[in-house]
Structures are given as C-alpha cells and as structure tokens.
Image (cartoon, rainbow, N blue to C red):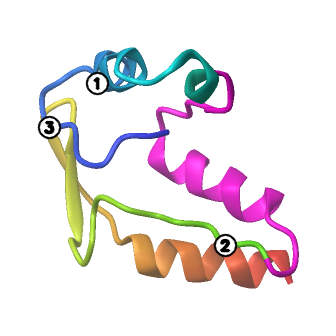
Amino acid sequence: LTTDDPGNEDPKKICDEILGGMSAAGRAKTTVVLDRGDAIRQAVKSASAGSVVAITGMGAETSMIVKGKKMEWGDGSFVREQISQKR
C-alpha cells in the first residue's frame, strides 16, 4: 500500500484510513511503503517469474504532488527501469 498523489494530505494518514477500512486479515497481509518509488521497487524486486505486480492509482499521469510540491513522475517509465535493473 502506497501513495498515489497525496497533494497536501499526509500520506501516512491516507494509508492509515485505508487500513482502517480493511479486515484484520487484510491488514496482516498488507505492507505499507509511503514512498511510491520505494514501494514499486520493493514489489518488483520481490516478484518472481510468473508473478503479477499490480500498480494502480496514477494511470498515465506524468507528475504528482507530495507535500505541496509538484514532482515529475511516471509509473510506466519507473517500472520499466526497475524491471531492467532486475534482469
């Protein structure tokens, strides 16, 4: 579980609210990584052949706002970079 363009909101608070709506069993199986890049990096690194990593929320957006600051970001290019580094 990670952020997907938190704007001026606190990413930890957003994740805590999502976790609050999950069952105890669901929470027990969920890892929270507040930094989106770190979360994707960890997911790709932990994936094995035949695994599926679902990266949702940002779509084709090319930037996100974190703590009021706009930063260039693209899930697609970041994921491709992570996969190529894993090979």
* Residue 22 pos. (x, y %): 43, 24
Q: Nearer the viewer, mark 2 or mark 3?
A: 2
Label 3: which residue? 7
Q: Amino acid at mark 3?
A: Gly
Per the image, the residue denoted by label 1 is 14
Where residue 54 sits: x, y (%)?
52, 66
Closest to the observer, 57 or 71? 57
Quarter of the figure with residue 9: top left
Q: Give the camera-side residue of 14 and 66.
A: 14
Assign a secondary structure to mark 3: loop
Q: Residues within 10 Å of mark 2 (few under 14, many from 20)?
A: few
Q: Earlier in the sequence, mark 1 or mark 2?
A: 1
Q: Residue at position x 61%, y 79% from top?
A: 81
Question: At label 1, which amino acid type do we have?
Answer: Ile
Residue 24's disc number: none
Vertically, is 57 above or below 86? above
Query: In the picture provided, is 56 more to the left or to the right than 77?
Result: left
- The residue under the point 77% across, 77% down is 85
**Separation of residues labelled 2 and 3 (CA atoms):** 28 Å
- Residue under numbered circle 2: 52
Residue at 24% in and 78% down: 60
